[in-house]
Structure formats: C-alpha cells, structure tokens
Amino acid sequence: MPESGRAGSLPSRIPLRRGKTNGDTMSGLTLNSVRKDFGSFTAVNDVQLNVPHGTFVCMLGPSGCGKTTLLRMIAGLDLPTSGEIRLDGEDITAVPTHKRNLGMVFQSLALFPHLTVGENIAYPLRIRGAPREEQKRRVEELLAMIHLPGYADRPVAKLSGGQRQRVAIARALTRSPKLFLLDEPLSALDAKLREAMQVELRQLQQQLGITTIVVTHDQREAMTMADTVVVMNQGEIRQAASPIEIYRRPADTFVADFIGSTNLIDMDTDSTGRAIVLGQAIAGLSAPRSGKTILSVRPEDVHLTAPGSEGAITGTVTFVRDLGGTIETFIDCSGKPLIAVSTPRARPEVSVGQPVGVVLDPGVCVVLDR
Ligand code: ATP
C-alpha cells in the first residue's frame, strides 16, 4: 500500500491530538476585514472569516480571485494593507512567518533533492538543534503516518510524485504546527493519485485534529476534503459553508454556477402572484417578492415526462450524453437550454428531436437575485 498512493486508514500507534470543533472564536484562526492592495488593484477585499480550531477549510475560486494572496497573508509572507489576523486569540498580523508555528506545503514542494527522505523530514528539527534521537524518533513517527515506513535513507530524487507529496506533508508537520497551510498541493499529480491523496490528506487531518487551510481551484477536491468551503471571486468571499450547504443552498448565481453544474432560469411573478418559469406556472414554488429573480435548478432535479403533462414545461431534446452510470439530456425550452441528469433506469426513453415535458422539483430549486 505505501507506494501505491491508495487511501488507507492510518496506523493506530500515532498519538492523536483531536481538535475541538466547537466554534470557540478564541481558538482557531480569525480574519477581520483583511484587505490587500497591489497599487490601485485590490486583490483581497474586506475578508471576514473564522476557522474554528481543528477544522479543514478549502479556499476555492477561479484563477486570480485572491486565494493565494489570502493564504500568503495568513502565512505571514505578505502583510495585509489593512485588517487583522488572529491565531488562538493572538494578533499575528505582523508576526514573521517563522514565529507563527505553521506547516506549509506549496505546489512546488521545495524538498531538498540532495538530502534523503529522513533528512528532509528532520530538517526543521535539525536547524533548531534538536537532539539526534528526537529527530530520529519523529522521522519514524511521521514516516509511519504517511505510509512510508523504512524510507528514511532513500534519496528524495528517487521517489514518485505521490511519495514526494507525502514527504513534503510530513516535513510540514515535523514541528506539530498550530496551523497547516497548503497551496494547490496536489495539482502536479495525475487524476487518480490526486483523488487518493485527497482522501489521505483528509484522514490525516482528522487524525491529528490540526487546523488546515488548503487553496484549490478544484471544486471536487474541496468537496472531498473540507468541513468548510470558502468560495471566493474577485477578492471577496461569496459564501463560506459546508460542501453540501454550498451545493444545495448557494448564496448567489456565481456560487451556484461555480460549484457543480446548474440550470439558471429567469423567473417572474404574474399578476396573481404565481411563480412563472419559461412561461409555465410552477406549483409549490414561492413567488419572488421582488419580481425578477433567477431559479437555480441542479440537473438531477430536472425530471423528464411526457410532453403536455400537467405542470410540465415543453421542450425538445437536442442531445443525449450516455455516460453509462448517468445520462445527461440536453433540452431546448423556447430557446433556453437546460440539462437534466438521471440514472439510466430512472429516465424515460428519449431521443434527439423528440418533444419532452420538463418538471422542475420545486422543493429543491433555489431562488436567487437576478
Ligand atoms: P490562481 O488560482 O491563478 O493562483 P489566485 O486566486 O490564487 O489565482 P492570487 O495569486 O491571489 O490569485 O492573485 C490575485 C490577484 O492579485 C491577481 O489578479 C494577481 O495578478 C494579483 N497579484 C498577486 N500578487 C501580486 C503582486 N505581488 N503584485 C501585483 N499583483 C499581484
């Protein structure tokens, strides 16, 4: 198992330090109105965030949204233009990186290629002058933890990508940091290994109870690992919530569209107060008070039925993508494209060009500002 990169449970002899996740704001990381300007450009704008001790946060957003800049300020590599960063109640905004007790892993890993695995992992202890015995013991503990026991004397240069990744993680944890920061740590790995490492990283974090913040642009990765997903766009936090909350109750159309795929459909209210979507009154859907809104409907909540069925919107099938386990049906409803996803058994037989009835599940649709 060690070399394969497959996920597995961790050895039981590693002492566990389970974190409190009671939302105590004195314990954990707090960002108060954190802002970063580069000249006249605002990369991070008034960010407010509380990361309770022992939780796993993924910062997610499109390229250039300010994720890395925010992480660098948490790490002490950049100073905020304004605002405050607190760790366990202490103001660390201007505390230098090496005094913050952080573990960091960046995309480049920055392992020392001329050193062995053990020397790399022991490095943070060696520069502090820790006794050799302590270094050896800690290296062995960490190697067991990352499923590479017996690897201490191997040259780092001879490891696979996934093994190097684990060594970088182990080295960041050598000094039992208060905060574990990772920037796109898995992006250099191929898809399969990456998925396995996501599970491993999450399991490791849960075993150690260490407060962890990962920057990623991969929403599947964020959904796999995080207690809280922080969705950013243009320097601002658009929503911070659990993965399922983000998926099921997106705060706005940006989040709804960025996380997974969704159908965004204009919604109006008629003179009798009914919700009208694509010309059809939708029973069971609360009519928007403000008039014009947008309905977000996940593809799995779009159901196909016979055309002309009561309450169904009429459309025409334009494309069918059969992926084996799921079928995606593309439908045109009076010029508006929709996507429905279902399992093969749950879907009526339809073919391209055929008229079809489309039913939107009112219980799970989300009404958003237009
Ligand atoms: P990516 O996923 O592509 O790494 P990101 O969300 O991590 O993107 P940042 O690296 O935080 O984005 O950058 C946010 C914005 O700030 C970008 O427009 C970037 O060009 C700008 N920026 C970052 N660092 C600097 C700098 N040192 N000087 C000027 N602009 C910068």
Image (cartoon, rainbow, N blue to C red):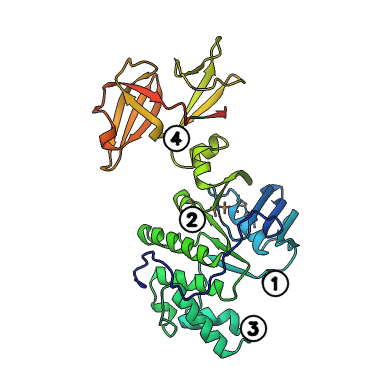
- Residue sitting at the far top: 271
Pointer 2 and pointer 3: residues touching (CB < 8 Å)? no
Q: CA distance from mark 2 to mark 1?
A: 28 Å
Q: Residues within 10 Å of mark 2 (few under 14, many from 20)?
A: many
Residue 128 numbered mark, or none: 3
Label 2 vs label 1, nearer the camera = 2
Can residue 38 be seen in the rendering of this structure?
no
> Disc 1 marks which amino acid?
Lys
Earlier-in-chain disc, 3 versus 1: 1
Cβ–Cβ below 8 Å for labels 3 and 4?
Answer: no
Q: Which mark is residue 253?
A: none
Q: Label 3 neighbourhood size at 10 Å, few (<14), some (14-19), many (20+)? A: few
Disc 4: which residue? 262
The quadrant of the rendering that contains the N terminus is bottom left
Q: Is residue 254 above or below residue 180?
A: above
Q: Secondary structure at mark 1?
A: helix
Give the residue drawn at x 51%, y 73%.
170
Q: Are marks 2 and 4 in contact (CB under 8 Å)?
A: no
Mark carried by residue 225: 2
Lateral position of residue 64 relative to residue 220, left or right: right
| Amino acid carrying mark 4 in the image | Thr
Considering the numbered disc 2 on the image, is that residue within a helix, a strand or a loop? helix
What is the x, y in percent for residue 10? 43, 69
Identify residue for label 1.
Answer: 99
Q: Find residue 11 and report its horizontal and vertical position in percent.
A: 43, 73
Q: Position of residue 84 (x, y in %)?
A: 74, 56
Residue at mark 1: C-beta within 8 A of ligand 1: no
State how far apart marks 3 and 1 are (Cα): 13 Å
The tag earlier along the polypeptide, 3 or 4, is 3
Determine whether, in the image, residue 277 is placed left or right of residue 100: left
Query: How far separated are the C-alphas under marks 2 and 3?
Result: 32 Å
